[in-house]
Image (cartoon, rainbow, N blue to C red):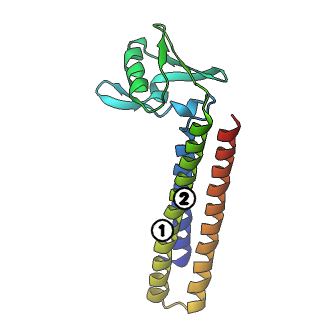
Amino acid sequence: MSLDAVIKDTEARMEKAASVFREELKGLRTGRATPGLVENLRVEQYGSPTPLKQIAQISIPEPQQILIKPFDPSTLKEIEKAIRSSDLGMSPNNDGKIIRLNVPGMSGDQRQKLVARVKKSAEDAKVSCRNIRRDANKGLEKVTKDLGLSEDEGKKAQEKVQNLLKKYEAAIQETADKKSKEVMET
């Protein structure tokens, strides 16, 4: 394995950590209806949990409402059950063909808790990136030693990894700040 391979692997792993963080934020309720609130909700279908987006059409007819239209109407009860058992805090209205979810507004206290949750998730994602950097630096030291490369080459590679860390930490922080602002505004 070369120094470049270690750096490429490091960047891919950091991108994955940032991606997981962004996906986690999609599912947070901000007082505004978005498909991301329910699309990954697991619904029991034919004995296996299936993401809601695979078994139903999800649309937003109004800013405070989510409309769920299952491809197979016989799954309505299971979808309703999954929504009720989730931590969304919304009660589904089932009219026999579609399910409507009204997204309630959030109190100031709920907003503060959500912002704290966003900050914690962002910090977790940054810690993940720092752990990836630590692993990469160990890998770089090993590769430098195994290939008999100069210390300068190893240091340059570690600087590249450090720059990657700074880049991804900044991106994660920017995403968190944007989401926190969105939560406080809506």
User: As rendered, which of 18 and 118 lies closer to the eye?
Assistant: 118
Report how far apart the C-alphas of labels 2 and 1 lie in the structure: 12 Å
The answer to which image quadrant residue 151 occupies is bottom right
Q: How many numbered circles are shown?
A: 2
User: As rendered, which of 34 and 112 lies closer to the eye?
Assistant: 112
Q: Which residue appears at 61% of the width and 27% of the height?
A: 105
User: As rendered, which of 135 and 150 lies closer to the eye?
Assistant: 135
Type of amino acid at the residue the image marks with label 2: Glu
Q: Is residue 103 above or below residue 36?
A: above
Q: Is residue 178 left or right of residue 100?
A: right
Q: Which residue is mark 2?
A: 123
Residue at the extreme left: 47
Q: Secondary structure at mark 1?
A: helix
Q: Is residue 149 above or below residue 107?
A: below
Q: Which mark is residue 36?
A: none
- Disc 2 residue crowd, few under 14, some 14–19, many 20+, Cα 10 Å: some
Residue 27, x across and y down, in percent: 53, 38
Residue 147, x across and y down, in percent: 47, 87
Q: Which residue appears at 45% of the width and 32% of the height?
A: 41
Q: Nearer the viewer, mark 2 or mark 1?
A: 2
Q: Which mark is residue 131?
A: 1
Q: In this orientation, does residue 133 appear?
A: yes
Q: Which residue appears at 38% of the width and 15% of the height?
A: 77
Q: Are marks 2 and 1 in contact (CB under 8 Å)?
A: no
N-terminal-most mark, 2 or 1: 2
- Disc 1 residue crowd, few under 14, some 14–19, many 20+, Cα 10 Å: some
The answer to which image quadrant residue 34 occupies is top right
Q: Which residue appears at 46% of the width and 72% of the height?
A: 135
On-image quarter of the C terminus: top right
Q: Is residue 39 left or right of residue 162?
A: left
Residue 176, x across and y down, in percent: 63, 51
Type of amino acid at the residue the image marks with label 1: Asn
